[in-house]
Image (spheres, rainbow, N blue to C red):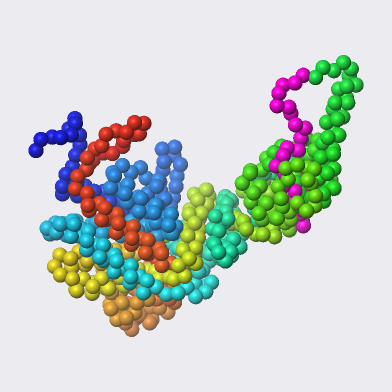
Amino acid sequence: MPEILANNPERIQGRDALRSNIAAARAIALTVKSTLGPKGMDKMIVDQAGNITITNDGVTILKEMQIEHPAAKMLVEVAKTQENKVGDGTTTAVIIAGELLSQAEGLIDQGIHPSIIIRAYAQAEEFAQRRLISFSKPIENRNTLHQIATTAMTGKGIERYKEHLASLLIDALDHVRTQESLNQENIKLELEVGPTTEKSELIVGIILDKERVHPSMPSKIENAKILLVDIPLEVRSTDIDAKIQLSDPKQLQQFLEHEEQHLKSITTNIIQSGATVVICQRGIDDLAQYYLAKANILALRRVKKSDMELLEKSTNAKICSSLKDLTTAILGSASTVEERLIGETKMVVVSGCPNAKAITILLRAPTPQNAQECKRACTDALGDICAAINDKRMLPGAGATEIHLALALEEFAKTQSGRNQLAIQAYAKALESIPHTLAQNAGLDAMDSMTALKAAHQNGLSTLGINTQPSTYTQAANQINQMSNSNLLLNTEQEGIFEPLSIKTVALASATQVAEMILRIDDIILGKPKENTNNSFKLD
Ligand code: ADP
Ligand code: MG
C-alpha cells in the first residue's frame, strides 16, 4: 500500500493497535487494583518536587501519575467522570473497564470481531442497569446513611475514626440541606495538622483565615453584633498626587487633627450602632484600630469578598458601603466570634449564625499526608451520602451486587446465541473481578471465596458478600456456615455495608463506554503537533 502520510510517522494498525490499547488500559487497571476495598494497599506517589502523596483513592493515584499512552489516558477519564458524577467508586470503575478489555482480548483471540463484542457489551450493560435498579432497596433512615458513609471510609487510613467522621459529615449536611437542594458546596473541609483525628469537629459557621487587627481587642465576643463593611476605614489617599503647601506649622497640626476627627467620627458611628465585631473587606487605619479596641470591639481587615458574602448570608447582616447608612438594622448576629489557634495559625471562627448555611468540618490528623488522605476519604463519603440522598436507593457492597449481576448475566447469556453468548458471559466475568479482587487484596484464597459467594447467591442468599476479615463477623459466619460451611462470607445487611445506587450505575456506564470506545479503534496515528502543545504521545 502506498504511504499516504507525510514523513512516515509512527502508526499502528489493526490488531496491533487494539492490543497496544488494551495492554495500556489493563496496565492502568492493574495499578489501582491492589487498592480496592477494606484491605486495599496504599500507593506512595512522589512528584518531581519531592512532594509525597500517600493514598488508596483511585482517581488521586491516576491524576498524580504521569501517564502518556492515549488509551491509558482514556481510562483515567473514566475515574474522573466517576469522581465528578458521584464522588466515589473510582477504583471500581477503572477495574471493571480494564477487565472488560481483558475479556475482550480473549474473545478476539478466539476470532470474534470487535464489533460483535461491542454490541454484546452494550446489550449486557442495558440488562445489568435494569437489574441494578430492581436489586436496589430504598434507603430507610439516617442510620443507613451513616452506614453508607462508613462503607466508603472502610479501608482508608482513617478507618478507625470512620464512625465519628461519618456523624460529622451527616450533621454537616443536615445544616446546609434545604428541601430543594443539598448545598454540598457550603460544607468546607479544613485541615489541621496536630492532634488526633478523633478530635475532628464540626464548626457551625465560618472560619476566617485572619487575626484581630489589634492585640488589645477582645479575642472572643459572645452574642456578637456584626458589622460588615466593604469600604476602607481609613483616611482615603487621593487618586492623584497632590501637594499641599503649608505656610504655617499650625496648619499641619490642623490637617492632622482633621484626619483624626474624621477617623473618630467613623468609629463613633460604628460604636453607636451597637456593633461588637467589625469585619472589613479593606484596610483599617491604626488610629481607627485604637478607637475600636478601646470600645472593646473585635475587628478584622482585608477579609476575602467570598467570605464577606458567606458572612452576609449566614449572619443576616447587610454589607455596608457607606457609613452614613449605618444603623443597627444592618448588623448581623452570631452567638460567638472567637480568635482561635488552628494548627499553627490564628484564625477567627464565626459560629452560631442564625442561618447556618455554611459549615466547616475541621479535620485533624497527625501529619500532612494523613490530613490529605483524611480529606479525600471524607470527600468520597460525602459524595456517597449526597448520592444516597438523591437516589433514595442503595445496593449491598462487598461484591454482593457484582456477583448478583454476574449470575443474572450468565442466565441472560443462555438466551442468546453463539458469539453473543460468549461476549455476554465475558461481561459477567468482568464484573466478578470486583469480589475476586476484594478477596485477593485481603490475602485470601480468592477461588475459595468466589466459590462460596456464588453458591450462596445461587441459593438465594443475595445479601452475602466477601468477608475480608474471616476471623471476625462471627454472627454472619454462623448463619452462612450452615450454607457453605465457611466463614468466607458476610451478611452485608447485618454489617451495614451499603453503597448508593448511582455509584454502580455510573461505574457500569462509564466502564462499558470506555471499553467500547477502545475496542472500536483499529488505527493509531501520530497526529500533527499542535502549536504550543507538548505532544507527549509515544507508542510502545
Ligand atoms: P472505590 O474507589 O471503587 O470506591 P474502595 O477502595 O473505596 O474503591 O473500595 C470499595 C469496595 O469495597 C466496594 O466494592 C465496597 O463494597 C467494598 N467494601 C467496603 N466495605 C467493605 C467491607 N467491610 N467488607 C467488604 N467489602 C467492603
Ligand atoms: Mg470508595
Residue 92 drawn at (x, y percent): 35, 60
Residue 514 drawn at (x, y percent): 29, 54
Q: Is residue 167 left or right of residue 494?
A: right
Q: Quadrant of residue 444?
A: bottom left
Q: Quadrant of the C terminus?
A: top left
Residue 35 drawn at (x, y percent): 37, 57
Q: Is residue 234 magenta?
A: yes
Q: Is residue 132 above or below residue 68?
A: below
Q: Quadrant of residue 235?
A: top right
Q: Is residue 539 magenta?
A: no
Residue 276 drawn at (x, y percent): 79, 50
Q: How many marks?
A: 0
Name the residue furthest left.
Answer: 1
Q: Is residue 409 visible?
A: yes
Q: Quadrant of residue 526?
A: top left
Q: Residue at x 28, y 39 (%)?
A: 537
Image region (quadrant) for ligand 1 = bottom left
Report the magenta residues as a range. Answer: 216-243
Which residue is more in the foreground, 364 or 136?
A: 136
Q: Residue at x 43, y 54 (%)?
A: 84
Q: Residue at x 34, y 64 (%)?
A: 438
Q: Is residue 422 left or right of residue 27?
A: left
Q: Is residue 342 above or below residue 173?
A: above
